[in-house]
Image (spheres, helix red, strand yellow):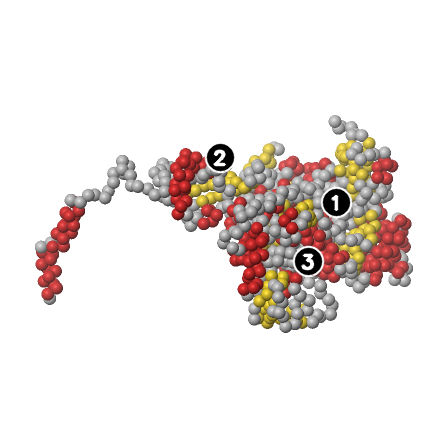
Amino acid sequence: MMNAIKNYIKSLFLLELLRGLRLTLSRLFRRPFTIQYPDERAPQSGRFRGLHALRRYPNGEERCIACKLCEAVCPALAITIESEPREDGSRRTTKYEIDLLIVETRIFEYHFEERGKHVMTKEMLLEVGDKYEAELAADRATESAYR
Amino acid sequence: MSDSSTPEMVTIEVDGQELQGPAGAMLIELTDKACIDIPRFCYHDKLTIAANCRMCLVEVEKVPKPLPACATPIMEGMKVFTKSDKARMAQKGTMEFLLVNHPLDCPICDQGGECELQDLALGYGRDISRFSENKRVVADKDIGPLVATDMTRCIHCTRCVRFSEEIAGIRELGATGRGENTEIGIYIEGSMQSELSGNIIDLCPVGALTSKPFRFTARAWELVQQPSIAPHDSVGSNILVHARGSQIMRVVPDRNESINEVWISDRDRFSYEGIGSDDRLTTPRIKTNGVWHDVEWQVALQAVADGLRTTSADQLAAITSPTSTLEELYLAQKLMRALGSSNIDHRLRLGDVRDQDSAPAFPGLGCSIADLESLDAALVIGSNIRKDQPILAHRLRKASNAGAELHFINPVDFDFVFSVANRLIIGPAGMVGATAAVAAALLEANGKSVPADIRNLCTASEVDQGAKAIAGSLQQAPRSMVFLGAIAESHPDYSVLRSLACTIASECGGQCGYLPQSANSVGACLAGAQPHRGVGASTVSDSGRGLAALVEGGMSGCVLLGVEPEADCDDPAHVIAALEDCGFVVSMHAFTTETLEQVADVMLPIAAFGETSGTFVNAEGTWQSFSGVVPPRGDARPAWKVLRVLGNVLDVEGFEYESSEQVRDELHRACEGVGTDTSQHGNCYTTALDVGLMRVADVPIYSTDALVRRSPALQKTGDAASFLARISHAQAAQLGLSDGESVSVVQGDARQVCTVVTDTRVPESTVWLSCGTAKAAMLGASIGPVSLEKGSGEGML
């Protein structure tokens, strides 16, 4: 009986609504957390995993030797690799494709305009690696202390 | 190892578990049987014991040092600890030493994921290497187009060396140097001679020896494994087909002690490469006005039905390949017989049909494959068994090693991997005489009079001594057999050879058996794919015409099932000519060839090996069924389904099968009680061959069927077919020819330019000119009169 009266008074004077508005009002005068992306950027760790890249050795040789372990371990089955002996007899991929559902470098801003374009081929991945090699190498050098 | 007397049983204790085994057995044999895991690299149950990897060290009570389980014979009351601290320490120590010189780059190695060293290193290896010195590097050896080498990875288990010496029977591989400088190498760079060489890929516990065609293309964990049956010889080796997606990536052996043990021939292992050959037929095609068009199945089947309907029954024929499955052959003959024609044949390389009605129900081995090992003596007539049926040759080798005396009557002195007690090497015409001489010698030794028929055949007196030796050996042996091989089958006096072989077998108390050539030679007889006998090899009232008779003419409609006339028939030129005269030819085949495009009117694409379910009956008569592993390429369909639908389109009754198993079961019921006696024979003693220079041809190991002919790796080996006329030195001198000279080979109307090679393996009056090349296909039958004419001949540049 008492509870019913209590609830009636609470709803009659909109007490709960006012309590909520009080929080809103208090936040209004604090410094906002939101940053003005893309004009403003949050700091990014060297371990950030964005767009994928295939790297090369300093002499220009691809690092990927088609061991296929990434293909085996990928839980989303997003990687497709086909391999065969290259002309010099070394083990290389003939096809290395990643269905871009997950990302690995610090580049995280990209988009696709057509269906099917989300699959990155070996050439595209190597291009990304070549473009950002300096950054990737620097990141890995910084992180090597923690590995 | 097995003695006729039962050995004493010994009881030992391993890890507290009591085990019993025969005295003298090695410890590891018992623990393997009891599923107690002991790590090992060099031990293999089919090879001799080397005990050089030291990985299987175990602790034995009262023995101060750990002992290798593979080389420690069990003794009464022995107490063994396989997982004690001492054993573990020894095993871990061994592993550390093995890894000292083994590269640690598993991701780049083709064995990664299926490597014995990788697996055991996980259990017995240290986390961090204590070895900071330089690792050794060994140059890779070129051992041919089938096996890739990475010799730096070798851990010197010597399994491959022991295999080549003990199983393959050719000392090809060996270890040179000592200690760290030990290297496994091949004596002759470039190629392995053995037709079983691929087995070293399976034996190698590390990635030192891997498959070259498979190299770097897939990982073990990506592959789906399905059991199947090898389709290339009458052994019916059990295999495992590894597929990724819809592609067959490789073939490895399956264990079946009664058939192939754990080995398969290179032919069975590497032929899969042919499946995706460029000339694969993937859509039904019809030829209109000499131009081929791709059409829908419905259109093609209707065209076939119309063509067959308009052909009169006695002019209708089916030529089937003995590598087709049982189901395909059964449905093909059922369809033919329903259309009123018994003109169906699978005996594409048969040289003589005179005694076909008195021949056995099927050309079986006459004993089980495993029984070959326990023979005491055998006479093999007209066979290059080592290349024709490598696994059977391996069994004979085991018999020979156990003391069996093997005798051969051959037109060429083929190289074998076992010791041959007596060999009568004599031209095709002389083979009959030599066989007759053995029969006569046996009859005389048994105190019987030699019938005049046999006496008249004994023409070659130079073989008398050898024949007597063979007769004596066969007579004394408790278990003896006489085998007729592939060359005997294509011999124009096959009937005579059969009669003589059966006489020899019955006189020496043995059996006469056959070495059938193809995967389903036996099955085709049971399925009724021959003109004179129906299903279950039953006699039929309306006997049809076989291939030999059909070639003579009177064929206006023909179904080719899996046949490439230019390569699968004994006398290709005549068959092609007959097919060109034939009004309507349907080719049901997985591939297309120039000849087929020329002679056929409709082509139906059918599934190749690994793409269809079916059954093969092997030489010993075992029915082995298998299922498809990958879907057929393109629009190709399993042939049994095509024949089934063709039956429906033609409104033939009894074609309502829904699975190949139904077809097989129907046939199996019909085959109950089929006689397995392989000693039946007619009494045919009139020879059809004249004396004079004769061609003799074998079918080279990598030319036997459509698939192996399309396997690039196999064609790169030394066993690939070559077009050479091999003659003896004396023959060359007599004809005034020298080594490497070009001559015209004339056989009937056919003439081809060929290089002469002098060869000590060829007897007098004989030209050894193998089948399997396009030029050889233009000549005549594999055994027949031939002449060599000096110079390139007219019409040639």
Eye-nearest disc, 3 or 2: 2
Question: Are labels 1 and 2 assigned to the same chain?
Answer: no
Amino acid type at circle 3 is: Thr
Eye-nearest disc, 1 or 3: 3
Q: Residues within 10 Å of mark 3 (few under 14, many from 20)?
A: few
Q: B268 and B505: which one is in front?
A: B268
Which quarter of the figure is the C terminus of chain B placed in?
Answer: top right
Residue at x 52%, y 40% (from the top left corner): A92
Image spot of residue B190 (x, y percent)? 68, 41
Q: In the structure shown, which secondary structural element does the residue marked by tag 1 occupy?
A: loop
Amino acid type at circle 1 is: Asp
Q: B710 and B529: which one is in front?
A: B710
Residue B279 visible somewhere in the drawing = yes
Distance, label 3 to label 2, CA atoms, is 49 Å
Amino acid type at circle 2 is: Gly
Q: In the structure shown, which secondary structural element does the residue marked by tag 2 occupy?
A: loop
Q: In the structure shown, which secondary structural element does the residue marked by tag 3 occupy?
A: loop
Chain letter of disc 1 in the image = B
Chain letter of disc 3 in the image = B
Circles 1, 3 touching at the beta carbon (< 8 Å) = no
Residue at x 54%, y 53% (from the top left corner): B118
Distance, label 1 to label 3, CA atoms, is 34 Å
Question: Are labels 1 and 3 assigned to the same chain?
Answer: yes
Eye-nearest disc, 1 or 2: 2
Residue at x 34%, y 43% (from the top left corner): A45
Residue B662 visible somewhere in the drawing = no
User: Which label number is shown at residue B698?
Assistant: 1
Task: Give the residue number, with chain letter if any, for mark 2.
Answer: A60
